[in-house]
Image (tube, helix red, strand yellow):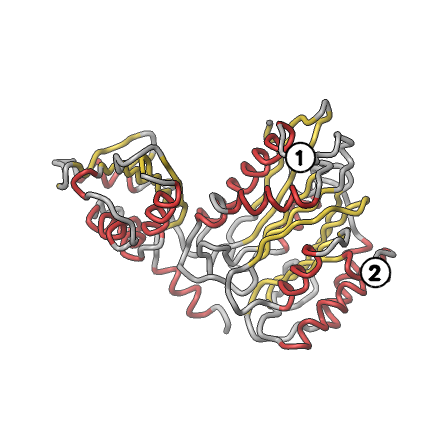
Amino acid sequence: MYTIDGGITAAKGFKASSCAAGIKYEGRTDMAMIWSDAPCTAAGVYTSNLVKAACVQWDKAVTASDEKVSAVVINAGIANACTGELGLQYCEETAKAVSEEKGIPVKGTLVASTGVIGKQLPIEKIVNGTVVLCETLDGSAESGTLASKAIMTTDTVNKEIAVSFEIGGKTVTMGGMCKGAGMIHPNMCTMLGFITTDCAIDKKLLQKALSENVTDTFNMVSVDGDTSTNDTLVVLANGLAENPVIEGEGADYETFKSALFEVMKTLAKKMAADGEGATAMLEVNVVNAKTKEQARVLAKSVICSSLTKAAIYGHDANWGRILCAFGYSGETFDPENVTLSFEGGGESILIFENGVGTDFSEEKATKILSNKEVKVIADFHLGDASATAWGCDLTHEYVSINADYRS
């Protein structure tokens, strides 16, 4: 597998566009579209929040059906959540606009929204924007990048990736983009994620690969402990690579699943690094746990700890907060059998073992914790299972962003 330039337009037959529809923001694009020249097999995973945005309800129904998907229309600024029947009607009106412009079935379009909860979409602006998007589709890498920028809300950078790999003697390409910086928490996050591939693969296997990979990628990210109403992650596969259709769980399926995992993990880490107000990404590696699930729970407990996140912001090696987070995770372990280290900037330091803190250099620890990427490595000496979670530090800026977000 090779990382290549580009994002959602990297795979054969995929195009993108973006425009400024004036939904909330001024002086920037706020709508984007993904288009496939060939109808796609589609799979999706969505928020675990019981309060689900209208667009989530629309997309879940489409991806759960046998409908082929050709388009995705995304808007930033208003979430179309808690908007009742009118919100669902607006999803359909958006899809109808694509249907009229491109001659595809209404259910051949997915819709996604991100932004303020509780406001109705300015549907006339949305429909007008959708028409513009349909007319300006382009397959260039630049068009994909511009689309990834148009869907941003409080993100400070756009997030995209593309890879290529071989299946059945054919070169297969996969690209993706996502947005997300706040209201990010395991079990899907305030994130919109879109992955495109020219691979030919059975729908059930596509859904299986997506659902299994999300457990150790997007579901291992937390910025602030809030699970959104709008989380959406969809994969579109149009088959234009002309590889033998993946219809069973053999070597080709494993190759595809591994590539999908790398795309999802990369996008998840980009989200964690761009957490609202963040100055550092925090990675927690739990090793030698008893089970995979235990390792996941322990790792997520640390990245969800506000006290730990604040300590990382202050470059303070306050390891007690990390042990505390492990302790209230609900998992059973012997604290005197845990080894804890920090890593960053190519250096590492042992800070806890045999039930007590080591005589480490506070100066060196502060230097390590001052890097933009900081790792916590925790060895529980219970088995051979491991898991990794990603988050970020908690800063004054996070409070400022979210105090003013709606106004």
- Of residues 300 and 99, which is closer to you in this image? 300
Residue 34 is situated, as x and y percent measured from the top left of the image, at 72, 50
Comes first in the chain, label 1 or label 2: 2
Residue 88 is situated, as x and y percent measured from the top left of the image, at 69, 71
At label 2, the amino acid type is: Ser
Q: Which mark is residue 398?
A: none
Quarter the N terminus occupies: top right
Rounded to the nearest whole Å, what is the CA distance between mark 1 and mark 2? 33 Å
Q: Quadrant of residue 389?
A: top left
- Of residues 155 and 286, which is closer to you in this image? 286
Question: How many discs mark residues in the rendered view?
Answer: 2
Q: Which mark is residue 99?
A: 2
Q: Quadrant of residue 288?
A: top left
- Of residues 372 and 268, which is closer to you in this image? 268
Residue 352 relative to residue 100: left or right? left
Residue 267 relative to residue 140: left or right? left
Circle 2 packing at 10 Å, graded few (<14), some (14-19), many (20+), is some
At label 1, the amino acid type is: Gly
Say if residue 285 shows up in the picture: yes
Give the residue displayed 35% in from the left and 39% down from the top.
Answer: 285
Say if residue 30 shows up in the picture: no
Give the residue displayed 67% in from the left and 67% down from the top.
Answer: 22
Q: Secondary structure at mark 1?
A: loop
Q: Secondary structure at mark 2?
A: helix
Give the residue displayed 54% in from the left and 65% down from the top.
Answer: 229
Q: Which residue is mark 1?
A: 248
Residue 101 is situated, as x and y percent measured from the top left of the image, at 85, 59
Give the residue displayed 66% in from the left and 50% down from the top.
Answer: 147
The vertical placement of 381 against 231, above or below, is above
